Image: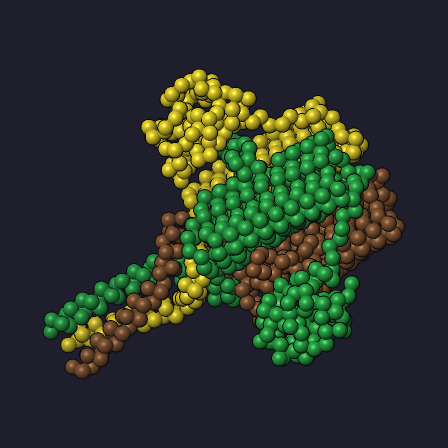
Chain colours: A brown, B green, C yellow
Amino acid sequence: MSLALGEIAVQFGCEIHGDPDVTVDCVATLAEAGPGSVSFLSNPVYRSQLAATRASAVIIAPDDAADCPTNCLVTGNPYVVYAQVAQLLYPAALPRAGRHPSAVVGADCDIGNGTEIAAGAVLGDRVSVGERCYIGPNCVIGDDVVIGSDSRLFASVSVYHGVAMGRRVRVHSGAVIGADGFGNAADQDGWIKVPQVGSVNIGDDVEIGANTCVDRGAIGDTRLGNDVKLDNQVQIGHNVIIGDHTAMAGQCGIAGSATIGARCLIGGGVAVNGHIEIVDNVSIMGRGNVTKSITTPGVYASVFGVEEAGKWRKIAARVKRLDAMAGRLRALENRLESLRGSDDDT
Amino acid sequence: MSLALGEIAVQFGCEIHGDPDVTVDCVATLAEAGPGSVSFLSNPVYRSQLAATRASAVIIAPDDAADCPTNCLVTGNPYVVYAQVAQLLYPAALPRAGRHPSAVVGADCDIGNGTEIAAGAVLGDRVSVGERCYIGPNCVIGDDVVIGSDSRLFASVSVYHGVAMGRRVRVHSGAVIGADGFGNAADQDGWIKVPQVGSVNIGDDVEIGANTCVDRGAIGDTRLGNDVKLDNQVQIGHNVIIGDHTAMAGQCGIAGSATIGARCLIGGGVAVNGHIEIVDNVSIMGRGNVTKSITTPGVYASVFGVEEAGKWRKIAARVKRLDAMAGRLRALENRLESLRGSDDDT
Amino acid sequence: MSLALGEIAVQFGCEIHGDPDVTVDCVATLAEAGPGSVSFLSNPVYRSQLAATRASAVIIAPDDAADCPTNCLVTGNPYVVYAQVAQLLYPAALPRAGRHPSAVVGADCDIGNGTEIAAGAVLGDRVSVGERCYIGPNCVIGDDVVIGSDSRLFASVSVYHGVAMGRRVRVHSGAVIGADGFGNAADQDGWIKVPQVGSVNIGDDVEIGANTCVDRGAIGDTRLGNDVKLDNQVQIGHNVIIGDHTAMAGQCGIAGSATIGARCLIGGGVAVNGHIEIVDNVSIMGRGNVTKSITTPGVYASVFGVEEAGKWRKIAARVKRLDAMAGRLRALENRLESLRGSDDDT
């Protein structure tokens, strides 16, 4: 696959600085690019690599274009145009329609045209899979699952019974969709299992990372809106609701019945308490702990960066004695007040 | 399945307010309930939904019963009774005795009556599985594993050689039981692998969440007591011991050789250091860091909730300068002391 | 397998205190050892168990040897010698050369002598597996993967296309190597997938824990050096580079394009931000948050240990009001200054 800069410019609305007939056939970082490759500048961290790049073309914002030593594709959003060009240069593998002889498919399943059921996959009864889907090797799909067209489940994905997912959904290896939520009632003699009778409902264009878990609802469904993006090792508790276009980096944990709005950006390792609500357009910085509802859009954080361990131990000890420090401050204020009082008396 | 309120009341010792002949056939939340459904009120967060509920019956505590607009099943522990009623209305799927032709079972295995070995499951040699168990699709069970009766392993569970688990154990998809603990000895040229020659011993009535890992012991076994409940993505290090009835929410990490008592409640994402001990009846709030032994029952915490990011940055900067603040406080105290001294001198 | 203390001493350069003809055939902890077992003392936490041990021999440092009630193997690094002795007493299982009939192997694969492909494993096309490897049950290996000799993939490992790993690599169950990095470009209408066209390159002697994920690069490869050790549930983002001999305990999360040096020790649950760099020989204590580059070797931390919850709530409230406290301190300083000024005036 090879693209002329002129084609790219027309298709994605870029301005060309340089030769529109130059072609590119691969992507590369600014630092490692060679002839024939297209690179991009989006994160300012990498601006210093621009001057020496050997790329045939760079996708770049207007403000940076003057500093570019090679052909430019100038656009307001270089990362988006880069993503689109890369999709053209590296088209996704198409499913090889049919089912591998080692796959096991239950009764009354409905498998769409062009769909591939790979080796070792196991589908339950009454499973519906749309057209042009890929069900990867050793996936296990429970009874009554519905998977929309053009979806792709990589190897070894587990989907419990009754889960419904939309079109163009991508689920990475080891993800588990629809396992029981964590419901246990404390009886005097121990725990009583609370049956998790809801399911999981996943919108269109959702991507779910490797080893991520989305639990089924206790009553009613856990819901991921359209275009939700979950990175690896995320844990979504039962009856969580996540709004459209919200993205969550790796290792987030969202406790049961939390509701997260649309277009939120949740950093890696963020924890959200159960039964709380986050409105639309909220960003949480990595490792933040959301312990109560957030009602105002904005950026939120609660992380301390590391310090040299000896210094940190002193800081932590000080923090734990803040009550004492506050007491000393109050005592000083009182003493000073009385001193001024006596001073005034003189 | 349909139950009359009178039957429920007799079986679970509830008092009925309303008509004992009313029947219910499903569960629902207060907000979404319709005729024929039974709901419950346990978490006060949802009390506001009580007045408008359309449930046929609500399982409820005595103090709330007067406010219930429909039939009540009154009990001191509504969540427990709800769980029991839901278990009756949604009976667990029974295993379909036998082994799927695509399952692979090693030599000298002992598979109990009524047990199902599902498609693609692979059992090693000398595996013992009790009666009425379910070994889900694509599970892999190592040599010499023992699984007690009425246990259920969902799809794609991995159990390493020699692991022993009790009766009525449930293990969710992607869980890994008995992988090597993290043991490496630092030699001058690099790491020397420390063989992990212990195993894992799991009691009765344990539930293990999706993608949770329980490592085998370095020497001797990692042990989960009876009725231990682990949510998803929990990491249990080698030689950890967890007492009966302890429950742990998602993403906890328990480092090697930690001992956790009975009836502990460990919130999501809690970290417990290695080689320490937590006594019985300890609760740790979500994301708490247990860095030393806890010798007194109680509730423990160490989390800061998020703030608006700009505000948080100021707080974090102040925390890191607490030493300076303490120094200024000390200087003030000294100055005030000398001032008072000179004041006294006059 | 049985070893005489004399043999051990010669092979690993220990001094013997006691009878070189005594033999041992198993390892045990100091507390649980019986006749025939060899134990060791390395962690001072367990020194109190030394006096009563019933081990036939203890591997021990010179300073502790005098207190040992039984035969000693005295060495400067007891843990390393213990590891080596345990490797002799518990030799790793050898692969059973050949492929199970239920395994599926694609076209043009190159499988080395002595390699075992276990039941249910699925290999893509053009996969190269070295000699004496073990590809466990239900593993899935993508197209064009290269696995070096003497490597061992436990059950249900997923390796995406194009991943390359060295010799003597061990990968535990549920690990996912080479899934897409988390790359999404924000367009006005939603997310545009950024194709992840790099791969993963893993050195020799690497061990990867259960359910750990190592993402493929966005452009160029994610790289783990030689002798890197990753515990369970670790998340390695795209284009991360990890230097030789670095070890990482469970549940660490390393964001995309971070670079971590050689011989680093990363505690459990540590988070490292994207696009930053950590030099060689850095230790991060458990749960530390590395939010910016670390340029100096040393030990770093950022964790607060739990306190009783009521006490913690007060501490957290004080922390969040530190600005107010700083203001009061400043006011006191000013007042005192003016007081002293007026004092001076008198």
Residue C286 percent location from the top left of the image: 48, 48
Relative side of C12 to C145, left or right? left
Residue A178 located left or right of residue C266: right
Residue under the image location 16 percent in, 81 percent down = A346
Residue in the foreground of this view, choosing between B312 and C75: C75
Residue A252 x/y as whole percent: 60, 55
The answer to which quarter of the image holds residue C328 is bottom left
> Which of B49/B74 is in front?
B74
Rendered position, A309 above or below C320: above
Query: Residue at 18% of width from left, 66% of height from top?
Result: B338
Residue B45 in view = no
**Which quarter of the rendering shows the N terminus of chain A?**
top right
User: Which of B76 and A122 lies nearest the eye of the viewer?
Assistant: B76
Residue extending farthest to the left is B346
Q: Residue at x 61, y 74 (%)?
A: B47
The residue that appears at 62% across and 76% down in the rendered structure is: B65
Side of C252 where C325 appears, left or right:
left
Q: Residue furthest front?
A: B10
Check the image and report above or below for B217 versus B93.
above
The part of the image, by quadrant, that contains residue C299 is top left
- The mark total stands at 0
Image coordinates of residue B2 in percent, x first then y, are: 77, 66
Residue A143 visible in the snapshot: yes
